[in-house]
Image (cartoon, grey):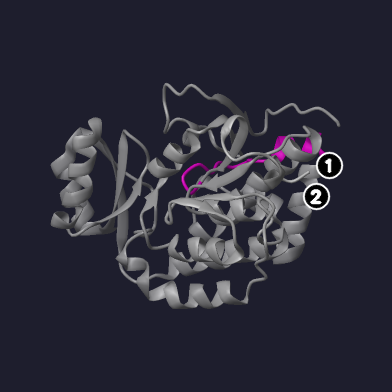
Amino acid sequence: MTGNEDPWGGLESTVAMFPGQGSQRPGMGRTLTRNYAEADEVFDECSDALGLDVRELAWDSSPEQLGKTENTQVALVAASIAAWRVWTQVGGNLAHAVAGHSIGALSAAIAGGYIPLADGIKLARRRGHLMASAPGQGSMLAVAVRGEDQRHGLITSAATFGLDVAAVNGERQVVLSGPVDDIEDARKHFGAKSTQLNVSHAFHSRLMEPVMAEWQELLSRAPFRAGDIPMLGCTSPGRLDTAMEVSNELYFGIRQTVRWDQVLEAADSFGTWVYLGTAKSLSRLRRNQTQTVQIVEDTYVGRRT
């Protein structure tokens, strides 16, 4: 059974969500592979596709090595799809929509059937290398906000600092991105409300534009296909159903603002939210929700169907 055989939204429907950069940790996915052959096979497929040991990359790297963008993105996709395979194949569960935060959108595209895992993990590796190669010294700053007025004010005023809005992560957080000096000015302005992120570049900002053409070329050669499960876009808000829509979402996903707030709004119509992989940080972006919540990571215990 595939996700599009069931109704969109409603109390009986489920949306599966995949995390982005910043949620990685050494060892992610290790316990799942020990407990489930389905997860182990994912790491085999990824390692074979890339010609490198993804287990060693995800499990034995130092936090600094794993934090390199080209490594982070591969490890996150592998761990996320391992959790997805266990949740669906072992647990016998079904998602009616998928969504992902930044690189998580690629995990969502793989889970939704829009691109095979072997090709998707290659895109993750190339995406990471491209984003890490973008010229200029950039950084990112997460700013806590209270209320819609404060959030809207920050979004509209980002340009006064010479920055772009990298992400709107819900009701309580906006992430700014841009040159290091401008980030430092914004950090001094916002003070304790802000946290400078441990990233190497200004992702989701104009500093990514020099690599956009090559990223588009890579996507144009990738074997996208009709998927099985609709996807919630985070740069193109709404329901995505076609290979072209999903490919475009991934293209704009390295430059445009991640509107996770709009993903959460769309997900409100689903009765169950499932966070897959190293997704606890993602689950914290929404509080006081009424939906049933599941987190599928290394401690997950599924049932054989």
Q: Which residue is mark 2?
A: 41
Look at the image and tell me whether residue 128 can be seen: no
* 151 relative to 266 in the view: left or right: left
Q: Residues within 10 Å of mark 2 (few under 14, many from 20)?
A: some
As measured in the structure, the alpha-carbon distance from the residue carrying label 1 to the one carrying label 2 is 6 Å
Pointers 1 and 2 in contact (CB under 8 A)? yes
User: How far from the left and from the top, in percent, is residue 230?
Assistant: 60, 50
Name the residue rendered at 66%, 51% in the picture: 112
User: For this rendering, which residue is in front, 272 or 30?
Assistant: 272
**Amino acid type, residue under disc 2 in the picture:** Glu
Q: Secondary structure at mark 1?
A: helix
Inspect the magenta stretch and tell me whether residue 27 lies in it.
Answer: yes
Name the residue rendered at 62%, 33% in the picture: 13
Q: Residues within 10 Å of mark 1 (few under 14, many from 20)?
A: some
Query: Majority secondary structure of the magenta segment?
Result: loop
User: How far from the left and from the top, in percent, is residue 191?
Assistant: 18, 37
Q: Is residue 172 above or below residue 226?
A: above
User: For this rendering, which residue is in front, 196 or 121?
Assistant: 121
Furthest residue in direction right, as rendered: 305
* 8 relative to 191 in the view: left or right: right
User: For this rendering, which residue is in front, 54 or 174?
Assistant: 174
Q: Which residue is mark 1?
A: 37
Q: Which region shows up in magenta?
A: 20-36
